[in-house]
Amino acid sequence: MKRLLMGFAAIGLMFPFAPAGVAGAASNTATTLFPLDGATQLETHAYLNCFKADGHCDFVAGAQMRTPDGVTGFPAGLWARQTTEIRGTNRMAYMDAHANGEYERVMKAMGSEEITTVYFGEGPPDKYQTTGRSDSTDWGTGQPMTNTNVILCTHIQVVYPGVNITSPSTCAQTNFG
């Protein structure tokens, strides 16, 4: 047993500068592909990163087109409405979301938040995404609640000449690490 402990001590000395992990954070990413026309697909994605230290989550939810040549934005004449919901699995968790887009509205409900984003016209893929932050609070104490899972779901209705389609939901789920 003494030799085994000495072996672990020697390994610890060999890697004193090994990178440390991010303490108290957990993340998850989800992607869904849905056929549009021919080889072109509608891709929706949800990214969620939650931090235990202060009970907040950063999120990104978006959409883009995937062609045989790679990822691209949407064509001219686009009108799209993306709906993103963030909620905790514990009914006592209140998720207070804030989004950063120009044409966004956040609807607050009992424990969940729904963000509606409207997009107009053509542009690069990063134009069609919502980013933000959600703080998890315990309804009973008013303190950060980190003993819950967090779920982020998004779907989008895309309309441009010749296309009017609504994607299925894409959901990412994680905890606070």
Image (cartoon, rainbow, N blue to C red):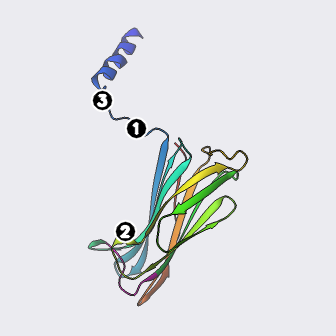
Name the residue that disc number 1 marks.
21
Three-letter code for the amino acid on which mark 1 is drawn = Gly
Task: Specify whether residue 133 is in view.
Answer: yes
Three-letter code for the amino acid on which mark 2 is drawn = Asp
Give how far apart the Cα atoms at labels 1 and 3 are: 12 Å
Residue at the left extreme, as displayed:
69
Relative image position of residue 150 (x, y in whole percent) = 57, 53
Viewer-nearest residue: 96 or 112: 96
Mark with earlier residue (2, 1): 1
Tag 3: Cα neighbours inside 10 Å, few (<14), some, or many (≥20)?
few
Name the residue that disc number 2 marks.
126
Relative to 45, residue 58 above or below: above
Q: What stretch is highlighted in magenta?
A: 72-79
Viewer-nearest residue: 43 or 19: 19
Mark with earlier residue (3, 2): 3
Name the residue that disc number 3 marks.
17
